[in-house]
Image (cartoon, rainbow, N blue to C red):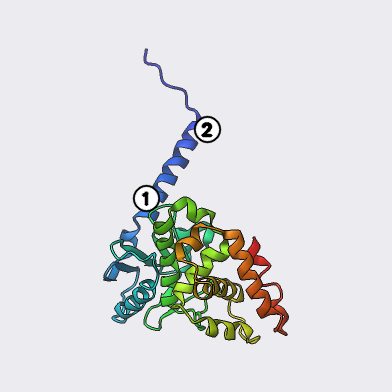
Amino acid sequence: MRQTKPFVPGVSLLGAVVTLLILYLLVICYPQPFFRYSVWHDNIRLYSTAPIPPNAVFLLKEVQTRLATSPAYDGSVEQRIFICGSAAGFAFFTNFAVKSSGLTYVYLNRNIFLRPSDIRQNRLTNYSGLKVMDDRTLVYYMAHEVTHSLTVSYIGVWRYHSLPKWLREGYADYVGKGHDSLLHLQRKFEDCSYQTNREYLGYELMAAYLLDIRNIGLRDLLEQNHVSNLAAAQVYMDSLKRSLACSSAGSLGREVAH
């Protein structure tokens, strides 16, 4: 008489969950079938669910121009950027970062996913469904996210994981904004009417101060003396904040210690 193995619901459910997780990771690592259209410039390839307008190549050229200013830039490594066609699609590919504007899977194969965007107008759509109309263009978002990928290649995954937020995001903005001059950044920060993402503006200011004024090399900035570099940058930020009348800047700087 043939014996059958007993059905164990818990084991079967676990197997199904593991299978779904593996399939999801495969989709995250190889999402190309979901993005029908693509265009590239040198080592940067842009994917989209909708037809890509001709000006996309010019945007990618500008992205590469900004990236090339970084010592971490490596033109031999392909960078893949996927522009999602809908908010739901972005939520699927980014899950825990659903409210962000973009996500780089630094611990996988560094695919980059961005929110739905108007490539023709060089604009990204935010979580509220509105186009971001300030100085954060689509070029900025692409260069910012690729900088995260470059940083991982430059110092390794574990060192990247240990970077404080102010440094990780500050350097990505420093490159993504096109290596803005410190004087221009200071003027934006001192302008109390400029309320666009002041937290990240502070991070960018700190990175620019350490790199351009204190002349700290990028590798030393990323790998050494995070505590002393933070202290030096905070002294600089405190000197700026003392001259400000707007209260919105009062909390900026205290957040970077976290």
Q: Secondary structure at mark 2?
A: helix
Horizontal side of residue 150 vs 193, given as left or right: left
Q: Quadrant of residue 201?
A: bottom right
Q: Could you tell me the amino acid type at mark 1?
A: Leu
Q: CA distance from mark 1 to mark 2?
A: 24 Å
Q: Position of residue 163 (x, y in %)?
A: 53, 58
Crowding at label 1, few (<14), some or many (≥20) Cα neighbours within 10 Å?
A: few
Q: In the rendered image, which residue does mark 2 sit on? A: 10
Q: Quadrant of residue 116?
A: bottom left
Q: Position of residue 150 (x, y in %)?
A: 40, 62
The numbered dot on residue 26 is: 1
The residue depicted at 61 percent of the width and 70 percent of the height is 233
Q: Who is closer to the viewer here, 64 or 104?
A: 64
The residue depicted at 39 percent of the width and 67 percent of the height is 71
Horizontal side of residue 249 vs 52, given as left or right: right
Q: Disc count in the image?
A: 2
Q: Is residue 114 visible?
A: no
Horizontal side of residue 29 vs 8, given as left or right: left
Q: Position of residue 22 (x, y in %)?
A: 41, 45
Q: Secondary structure at mark 1?
A: helix
Q: Could you tell me the amino acid type at mark 2?
A: Gly
| Above/below status of 92 relative to 191 | above
- The numbered mark, 1 or 2, whose residue comes first in the sequence reads 2
Q: Position of residue 20 (x, y in %)?
A: 43, 45
Q: Who is closer to the viewer here, 124 or 111?
A: 111
| Above/below status of 57 relative to 18 | below
Image quarter in which the N terminus is found: top left
Crowding at label 2, few (<14), some or many (≥20) Cα neighbours within 10 Å?
A: few
Q: Quadrant of residue 36?
A: bottom left
The residue depicted at 41 percent of the width and 77 percent of the height is 139
Q: Who is closer to the viewer here, 124 or 194?
A: 194
